Image (tube, rainbow, N blue to C red):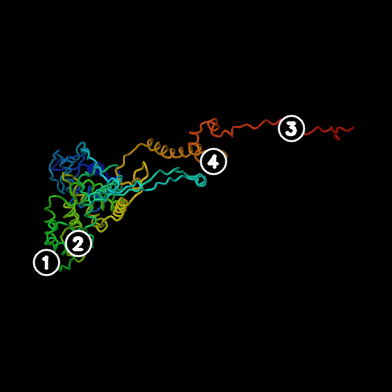
C-alpha cells in the first residue's frame, strides 16, 4: 500500500489516523519469535515496531523526517490503548508500550476510527449597508435622465452583443460606513478567501464561523508596530515583563543587554525552562481550540508552499490579538534559537531544534478533545511556522488591498440604473451555492440569448431604416447568431411577413421576347452539293 497525501478538509486527523494504521499493518514484517521457551507465530518485537513505524512516518509526506523516535513510541502506546496492537497474550488498553524486546501482534482486525458527525454550523449572513436610499435632505428628482440608444451602424461594424437602450439612471449617495460594517466586511472577505485557498465547498466542517470575531481581524491588521508585532489595546494582556526578558535573552544570545545579573554555566537552560514552564501552564493553545481543524486542514497544503503560506496568514489573522502577539514573539524566538550556533546546547541528548519543537508544540496547537495524532500534527505545523514565520505572521497584503478597495468603492457616490443592483459590479464575496452542470448550461444559454433576442426584435420592428438595410442587418445577425435567428424566424414564411418586398414576384418574361427576329435560312457548306 502506497502512502498518499491527505489533503485539507473535514476530519483530516481521523483520516490520517486510519491511513497510518493501514500502512503500519501492511508494512510491519511478521515472523516467528520465541519467548520463555515458547514460540509465537506472526508477531514482532516492540523495538522492531518502533523501527518500522518511525521509518514509515519519516518517509510519509503527511509527517516528514522531523518525527522523532520518542514520538513514534508515544504513538505506539496509543496503538496499544486503542487495540491496534496487543501483546502476545492478547492484552491491550494500557499505554505501557516500551522500546524493548517485548513481543506484540496485530489483532484479527485493527479498528479504524469512524468519522464523527459534527452539528452543522449555521452560516452567518453578513449584512452589508443598503445603498438604495439616499441621505436625508437630498433629492434626486432634479437630476436629468438621458436615454442612450445603441447605433445600428456601430453594432453592424463591431458584430458584438449590444445592450440596446440604456435605462434611466440616478446618483446614489452612500451612507457612511460604520466601524462595525467595515469589520464585518473584513470577516466576510477573509473567510471567503480562506475557503477558496483550502479548496473546500464550505468551511462549516472545519470552522464555526460564528466564533470568528471580526474586530480581532481588524485589530491584527492595523494595530501593529514597525516590526509587524501586534500592539494590544489592553496592556494587562501583554506578556509579563520577566517572560519577555527571558525570551529576548535567548533570542539575542549571547547579547543579553537587559540582564543585569551575571550568567553562570547552564544559565541558558534555566532561562529556557522558565519560558517552557510559563507557556506550558496555559489552559488553551495559542492557536485556540476553535481553529484546530482549520490548521490541521492547512497541513494538507504544505506541498503547495504559496497556498499554505496564504492559508496560514489568513487563519492567524483571525486569532485573538493577545494570542497572535504571543505567537509572533514565541515563534520568532524559537526560530532564532534553532539557528543560533553561538547558543550552547540546551540538552545533552536532543538537538536544540528538535527540543524546541517538542517543548512548544502542544502550547501552540492541540485539540480540546484527545486526538491521537495531536503531537505529530502540531510538530509538523510548528516546524513550518518556524521556517516561514516572517511571511506567515505578517498581514496578507493582497487580501488587505482588496478589502480596502472594496470599502472605498462602497463609500463612493455611485450611479444606479433602474431595476439593477447598485453594487452589482462589485458584489461582496459570499459563500457560493453549487449548481448542477445542466443548470449552468441553461443559465449560460438563457443569460446570453435573451439580450440577443431583444436586439433581433428591435432590428425587425425598426421602421426607420429601409427594407434593404434591414435585410442586410438581418443576414449579418443570422450569420453571427443562427440559433437565436432560427427561434425568431423558424420558417421562410415568417421571414417573408417581415420583408414583403422580398416576396414580390417579378412579371413573367415572355418567351418570344427571348427570341431573335426572323432571319432567312442560309445553307451551310455541309449541305451544299
> Callout 2 environment at 10 Å: few (<14), some (14 to 19), or many (20+)?
many
Mark seen at residue 265: 1
The secondary element bearing badge 4 is classed as loop
Residue bearing the label numbered 4: 465
Q: Is residue 272 visible?
A: yes
Q: Residue 402 in the image: x percent, y percent?
A: 31, 52
Residue bearing the label numbered 3: 513
In this view, 189 is above or below 340: above
Mark seen at residue 71: none
Figure quadrant of the C terminus? top right
In this view, 511 is above or below 342: above
Q: What residue is at 40 percent from the left and 36 percent from the top?
A: 442
Mark seen at residue 337: 2
Q: CA distance from mark 1 to mark 4?
A: 100 Å
Give 18 or 520, whichever is nearer the viewer. Answer: 520
N-terminal label among 4 and 2: 2
Amino acid at each position: 500500500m502506497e502512502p498518499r497525501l491527505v489533503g485539507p478538509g473535514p476530519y483530516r486527523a481521523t483520516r490520517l489516523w486510519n491511513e497510518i494504521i493501514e500502512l503500519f499493518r501492511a508494512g510491519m514484517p511478521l515472523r516467528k519469535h520465541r519467548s520463555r521457551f515458547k514460540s509465537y507465530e506472526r508477531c514482532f518485537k516492540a523495538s522492531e515496531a518502533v523501527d518500522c513505524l518511525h521509518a514509515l512516518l519519516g518517509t510519509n509526506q503527511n509527517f516528514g523526517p522531523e518525527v522523532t523516535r520518542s514520538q513514534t513510541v508515544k504513538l505506539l502506546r496509543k496503538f496499544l490503548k486503542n487495540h491496534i496492537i496487543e501483546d502476545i497474550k492478547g492484552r491491550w488498553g494500557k499505554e505501557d508500550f516500551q522500546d524493548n524486546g517485548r513481543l506484540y501482534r496485530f489483532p484479527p482486525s485493527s479498528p479504524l476510527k469512524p468519522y464523527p458527525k459534527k452539528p452543522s454550523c449555521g452560516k452567518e449572513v453578513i449584512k452589508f449597508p443598503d445603498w438604495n436610499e439616499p441621505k436625508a435632505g437630498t433629492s434626486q428628482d432634479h437630476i436629468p435622465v438621458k436615454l442612450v440608444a445603441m447605433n445600428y451602424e456601430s453594432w453592424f461594424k463591431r458584430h458584438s452583443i449590444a445592450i440596446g437602450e440604456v435605462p434611466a439612471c440616478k446618483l446614489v449617495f452612500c451612507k457612511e460606513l460604520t466601524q462595525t460594517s467595515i469589520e464585518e466586511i473584513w470577516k466576510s472577505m477573509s473567510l471567503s478567501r480562506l475557503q477558496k485557498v483550502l479548496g473546500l465547498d464550505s468551511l462549516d466542517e472545519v470552522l464555526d464561523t460564528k466564533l470568528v470575531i471580526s474586530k480581532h481581524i481588524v485589530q491584527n491588521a492595523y494595530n501593529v508596530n514597525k516590526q509587524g508585532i501586534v500592539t494590544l489595546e489592553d496592556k494587562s494582556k501583554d506578556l509579563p515583563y520577566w517572560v519577555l526578558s527571558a525570551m529576548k535573552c535567548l533570542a539575542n544570545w549571547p547579547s543579553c543587554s537587559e540582564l543585569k545579573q551575571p550568567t553562570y554555566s547552564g544559565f541558558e537552560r534555566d532561562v529556557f525552562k522558565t519560558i517552557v514552564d510559563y507557556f506550558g501552564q496555559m489552559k488553551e493553545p495559542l492557536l485556540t481550540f476553535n481553529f484546530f481543524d482549520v490548521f490541521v486542514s492547512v497541513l494538507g497544503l504544505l506541498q503547495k508552499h504559496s497556498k499554505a503560506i496564504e492559508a496560514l496568514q489568513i487563519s492567524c489573522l483571525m486569532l485573538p490579538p493577545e494570542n497572535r502577539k504571543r505567537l509572533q514573539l514565541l515563534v520568532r524566538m524559537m526560530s532564532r534559537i534553532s539557528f543560533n550556533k553561538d547558543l550552547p546546547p540546551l540538552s545533552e541528548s536532543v538537538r536544540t531544534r528538535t527540543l524546541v519543537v517538542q517543548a512548544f508544540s502542544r502550547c501552540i496547537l492541540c485539540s480540546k478533545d484527545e486526538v491521537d495524532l495531536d503531537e505529530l500534527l502540531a510538530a509538523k505545523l510548528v516546524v513550518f511556522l518556524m521556517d516561514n514565520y516572517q511571511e506567515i505572521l505578517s498581514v496578507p497584503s493582497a487580501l488587505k488591498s482588496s478589502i480596502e478597495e472594496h470599502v472605498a468603492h462602497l463609500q463612493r457616490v455611485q450611479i444606479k440604473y433602474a431595476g439593477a443592483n447598485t453594487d452589482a459590479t462589485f458584489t461582496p464575496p459570499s459563500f457560493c451555492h453549487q449548481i448542477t452542470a445542466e443548470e449552468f448550461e441553461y443559465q449560460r444559454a438563457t443569460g446570453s440569448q435573451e439580450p440577443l433576442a431583444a436586439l433581433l426584435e428591435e432590428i425587425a420592428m425598426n421602421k426607420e431604416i429601409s427594407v434593404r438595410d434591414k435585410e442586410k442587418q438581418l443576414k449579418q445577425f443570422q450569420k453571427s447568431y443562427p440559433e437565436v435567428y432560427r427561434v425568431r424566424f423558424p420558417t421562410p414564411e415568417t421571414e417573408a411577413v417581415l420583408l414583403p418586398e422580398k416576396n414580390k414576384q417579378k412579371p413573367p418574361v415572355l418567351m418570344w421576347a427571348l427570341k431573335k427576329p426572323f432571319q432567312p435560312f442560309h445553307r451551310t457548306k455541309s449541305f451544299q452539293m
